[in-house]
Structure formats: C-alpha cells, structure tokens
Image (cartoon, rainbow, N blue to C red):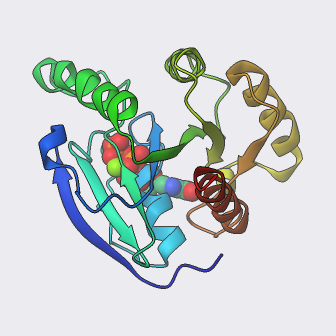
C-alpha cells in the first residue's frame, strides 16, 4: 500500500467531536514520547503533519488524519508520563478509553513501544487491557535506529513475550525502517474490517 494524500481533519476530546463520515479508523496508542505522531508523519511522508515534540505530552487531544479518502489514522495522547499535570492526566484515561471502547469505526490499534527499553509496566498494562477487551492490536517497536542491530531480535522477542503477541514490528521514523511492514498491518486491519 502506498499512501498518497493525508489531511488533518479534526481534534476531539469527546465523541460528539469525532468525524461523521464513517471511514474505518486505525489508532495509535503508546506511552508519551514513544513516537506516535512521528510514525504518522513517516507513513504519509510529511515532516510535520502531526505535531511532535521531544517533550512528553505533546498530543493532548484525539487527532484525526484522513488518508486518501479511505481511512483515518488516529493519533491519541500518550499515557504514563508523570510530568504531565495531574488534572490533565486524569482526563486522558477516560478520553482514550472512551474512544477505544466506544468507537465503532475503529478497525485496528497499533501499540507503540520503545525498542530501546525492556518492556515497561505501563505498556504491559495497556496490552493486558487491550487483550481483556478483545480489541485487535499489533505491536510496533519504535526508535530502532537507536538500538544496535545485534540487539534487535532479542529485544523484539522480549517485547512480544511481555505483551502477549508473536509478532513485533521494528520501526524507525528517522530512517523509515519498517514502514512497509507497518503499512501492511494497516492494510490487514482494513481488509479484515470489510468481511
Ligand atoms: N531516534 C528516533 N527518534 C524518534 C523516532 N520517533 C520519534 N522520535 C522522537 O521522539 C520524540 C517524541 O516523538 P513524538 O512523535 O512526538 O511522540 P508521541 O508518542 O506522539 O508523544 P506524545 O504526543 O507526547 O504522546 C521526538 O523528539 C521525536 O523526534 C524514531 O523512530 N527514532
Ligand atoms: Mg504525539
């Protein structure tokens, strides 16, 4: 799959603000600063379609990007960062949960984890929660450009075991490594949703 055009459509903090055109949606979840917004930019080949930042907590709303009038990539605020003010943190859980559990257009979730680190408690909780609610998700390990090649395989296996999945995709927004694999995941989500 090659993505041609992507456009920011809207931001939402509650369901009444979600898009109404009923295209399928693929959502990105993961810890703050793991690279969700960067992955969107890398996939669509636009440097700053989704806003990114080296400071955690950049994305604070649910942001919808329409791709080729075919589906939406949905950028969610990250979880698990203590630096974010408590007032904001408390609002995020219900906002993200409300979207993931209530959104009928949602056909698949990409859980992003940081390839540089061993599995993190927040990530395992998220994966458990997704399994528990029987939501369709795949795991992508980001920032592999920061990990020596020789450690990739072991780390991917370790992450997969901790998150309860056989396949973990290695990805880098900086080098574009794994882009085709992530696009294939999205294609699979879209294909399965049509049955
Ligand atoms: N080296 C490297 N840096 C990356 C990669 N992906 C993202 N980054 C950097 O990591 C930081 C966070 O990236 P974002 O895409 O803003 O992360 P996010 O998950 O959207 O973060 P929140 O919106 O805070 O939840 C930025 O400084 C990015 O440049 C990657 O694949 N490799
Ligand atoms: Mg973001």
Q: Nearer the viewer, residue 23 or 139?
A: 23
Q: Residue at x 56, y 14 (%)?
A: 132
Q: Residue at x 49, y 19 (%)?
A: 122
Residue 136 placed where, x, y %? 60, 35
Q: Is residue 135 left or right of residue 64?
A: right
Asked if residue 38 is positioned above or below residue 18 in the image, the reply reads below
Q: Residue at x 52, y 15 (%)?
A: 125
- Can residue 83 be spotted in the picture? no
- Can residue 99 be spotted in the picture? yes
Q: Is residue 126 left or right of residue 59?
A: right
Asked if residue 15 is positioned above or below residue 67 in the image, the reply reads above
Residue sitting farthest toward the bottom: 4
Residue 61 placed where, x, y %? 21, 44
Asked if residue 147 is positioned above or below residue 158 in the image, the reply reads below
For the image, the number of numbered tags is: 0
Q: Quadrant of the N terminus?
A: bottom right
Residue 32 placed where, x, y %? 38, 37
Q: Residue at x 59, y 56 (%)?
A: 194
Residue sitting farthest toward the front: 195
Q: Is residue 45 left or right of residue 90?
A: right
Which of the 4 image quarters holds residue 84?
A: top left
Which of the 4 image quarters holds residue 20?
A: bottom left
């Amino acid at each position: 799959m090659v993505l041609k055009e992507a456009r920011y459509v809207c931001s939402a903090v509650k369901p009444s603000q979600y898009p109404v055109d009923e295209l399928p949606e693929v959502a990105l979840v993961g810890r703050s600063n793991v690279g969700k917004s960067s992955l969107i930019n890398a996939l669509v080949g636009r440097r700053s379609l989704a806003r990114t930042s080296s400071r955690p907590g950049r994305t604070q709303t649910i942001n919808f990007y329409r791709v080729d009038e075919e589906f939406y990539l949905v950028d969610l605020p990250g979880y698990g960062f203590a630096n974010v003010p408590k007032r904001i943190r408390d609002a995020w859980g219900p906002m993200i949960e409300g979207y993931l559990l209530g959104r009928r257009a949602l056909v698949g979730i990409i859980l992003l984890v940081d390839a540089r680190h061993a599995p993190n408690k927040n990530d395992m909780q998220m994966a458990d929660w997704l399994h528990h609610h029987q939501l369709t998700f795949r795991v992508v390990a980001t920032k592999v450009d920061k990990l020596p090649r020789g450690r990739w395989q072991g780390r991917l296996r370790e992450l997969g075991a901790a998150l309860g999945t056989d396949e973990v995709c290695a990805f880098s927004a900086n080098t574009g490594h794994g882009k085709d694999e992530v696009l294939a995941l999205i294609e699979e989500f879209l294909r399965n949703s049509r049955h």
